[in-house]
């Protein structure tokens, strides 16, 4: 697996999570993917993304 940068863009996180970019943005908006807003840019800290994955906190939209 390729080493992830310490701070990811939403597009990088979407690729890592194998999500559509629009789905990743929606998850960020809903708070399912932890993020930080820097001006107009959204960034996702790698450690928080990994913690989220370890905790299995992400909801599969197909189960709704």
Image (tube, rainbow, N blue to C red):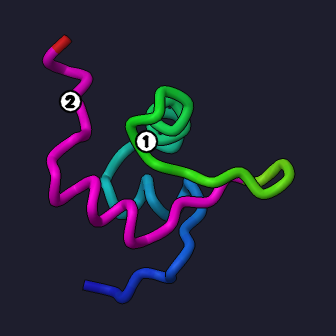
Q: Which residue is drawn at 46% across and 34% down?
A: 31
Whether residue 49 sits left or right of residue 59 in the image: it is right
Q: Is residue 45 left or right of residue 61?
A: right
Q: Which residue is drawn at 25% across and 39% down?
A: 58
The image quadrant where one finds the C terminus is top left
> Considering only vertical position in the picture, is 47 above or below 30?
below
Q: In the rendered image, which residue does mark 1 sit on?
A: 20
User: Start and end of the magenta stretch?
Assistant: 42-63
Pick the quarter of the image with the N terminus.
bottom left
Which class describes the residues within 10 Å of circle 1: few (<14), some (14-19), or many (20+)? few
Quarter residue 51 falls in: bottom left
- Vertically, is 41 above or below 3? above
| Label 1 element class | loop
> Secondary structure under badge 2?
loop
Quadrant housing residue 47? bottom left
Q: Choose between 14 and 35: the one closer to the eye.
A: 35
Residue 63 versus residue 2 in the image, above or below: above
Residue 29 picture location, percent across and down = 56, 30
On the image, numbered disc 2 is attached to which residue? 60
Q: Which residue lies furthest to the bottom in this view?
A: 3
Q: Marks 1 and 2, how far apart in space? A: 13 Å
Residue farthest along the right direction in this orientation? 39
Q: Position of residue 35 (x, y in %)?
A: 55, 51
Give above or below for 36 relative to 1. above
| Residue at (76% x, 54% y) in the render | 41
Q: Is residue 60 magenta?
A: yes
The residue sitting at 23% across, 31% down in the picture is 59
* Residue 44 percent location from the top left of the image: 53, 60
Q: How crowded is mark 2: few (under 14 residues within 10 Å), some or many (20 or more)?
A: few
Whether residue 54 appears in magenta in the rendering, the answer is yes
Looking at this rendering, what residue extends furthest in the top direction? 64
């Amino acid at each position: 697996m390729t080493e992830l940068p310490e701070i990811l863009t939403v597009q990088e996180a979407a690729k890592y999570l194998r999500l559509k970019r629009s789905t990743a943005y929606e998850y960020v908006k809903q708070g399912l993917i932890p993020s930080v807003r820097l001006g107009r840019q959204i960034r996702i800290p790698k450690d928080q993304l990994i913690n989220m994955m370890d905790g299995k906190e992400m909801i599969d939209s197909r189960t709704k």
